[in-house]
């Protein structure tokens, strides 16, 4: 019996993915992950790379996809409080050496993860400049220092994470931030 790629494309199968940009790299870095979903026609799959909270699409016959022999349950996503790190896919960016996130329905509220008002102000201005916004709008006095806890949301949530504003110094995963509301 011959095994085809569509036979191998099953939810829970461990895979290794080499990004298209790395296919010509002699080292061809392979990123381990798991198939989380298979398209009805078995022409494509969704893959969650280990340590990531988002899925990537791939054709079942993509040359950078290696199917491994291990098949099991798809691991649950981590939930609850976490310490934020720069990650473009999750909307957390590094600006002027500090972590920055635009929050709110339209990204109108800004969170800068630092206890230093000057660094928060510089990050807000860098973000505004990058977006072609009026820099006069950024007011250092408008930055409100606070403690906050970032929390992961379920995979199908509108946003991958939320911020809890009721945090206090010493709370699990609480970080010092400056908040700039719209």
Image (cartoon, rainbow, N blue to C red):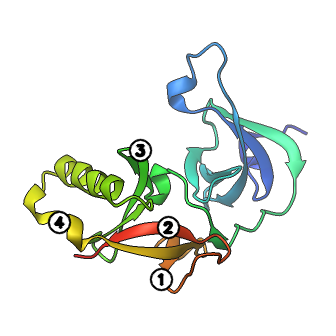
Q: CA distance from mark 1 to mark 3?
A: 23 Å
Q: Is residue 87 above or below residue 160?
A: above
Picture quarter containing residue 135? Answer: bottom left
Q: Which residue is mark 2?
A: 176
Question: Considering the numbered disc 4 on the image, is that residue within a helix, a strand or a loop?
Answer: loop
User: What label sits on residue 165 in the rendered view?
Assistant: 1
Is 158 situated left or right of 152 in this image? left
Question: In the displayed structure, would residue 7 be above or below residue 81?
Answer: above
Report, in whole angstroms, how far the alpha carbon at label 2 lies from the one at label 1. Answer: 11 Å
Is disc 2 placed on a helix, strand or loop? strand
Q: x, y percentage for residue 141? A: 22, 70
Who's the residue at 75% across and 59% down the image?
11
Is the C terminus in the top left, top right, bottom left or bottom right quadrant? bottom left
Q: Earlier in the sequence, mark 1 or mark 3?
A: 3
Q: Earlier in the sequence, mark 2 or mark 3?
A: 3
Question: Disc 3 marks which residue?
Answer: 97
Q: Which one is in front in this view, the residue at disc 2 or the one at disc 1?
A: 2
Evaluate if marks 2 and 4 touch, with contact meaning CB atoms under 8 Å apart: no
Q: Is residue 139 left or right of residue 180?
A: left
- Within 10 Å of disc 1 (Cα), the crowding (few <14, some 14-19, many 20+) is few
Q: Separation of disc 4 and disc 3 at Cα?
A: 19 Å
Q: Earlier in the sequence, mark 2 or mark 4?
A: 4
Q: Residue at coordinates 56% horizontally, 24% vertically from top-left?
A: 22
Q: Estimate the x, y position of residue 42 in percent, counting from the top left.
A: 64, 53
Q: Is residue 93 visible?
A: yes
Left or right, 109 with reference to 38: left
């Amino acid at each position: 019996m011959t095994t085809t790629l569509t036979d191998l494309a099953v939810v829970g199968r461990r895979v290794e993915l080499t990004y298209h940009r790395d296919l010509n790299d002699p080292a061809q870095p392979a990123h381990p992950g798991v198939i989380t979903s298979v398209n009805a026609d078995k022409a494509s799959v969704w893959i969650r790379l280990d340590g990531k909270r988002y899925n990537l699409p791939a054709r079942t016959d993509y040359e950078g996809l290696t199917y491994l022999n291990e098949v099991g349950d798809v691991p649950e996503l981590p939930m609850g409080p976490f310490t934020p790190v720069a990650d473009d896919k999750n909307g957390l960016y590094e600006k002027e050496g500090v972590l920055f996130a635009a929050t709110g329905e339209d990204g109108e509220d800004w969170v800068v993860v630092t206890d230093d008002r000057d660094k928060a102000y510089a990050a807000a201005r860098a973000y505004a400049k990058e977006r072609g916004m009026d820099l006069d709008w950024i007011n250092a006095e408008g930055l409100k220092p606070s403690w906050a806890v970032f929390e992961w949301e379920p995979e199908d949530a509108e946003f991958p994470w939320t911020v809890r504003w009721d945090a206090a110094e010493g709370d699990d995963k609480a970080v010092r931030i400056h908040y700039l509301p719209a």
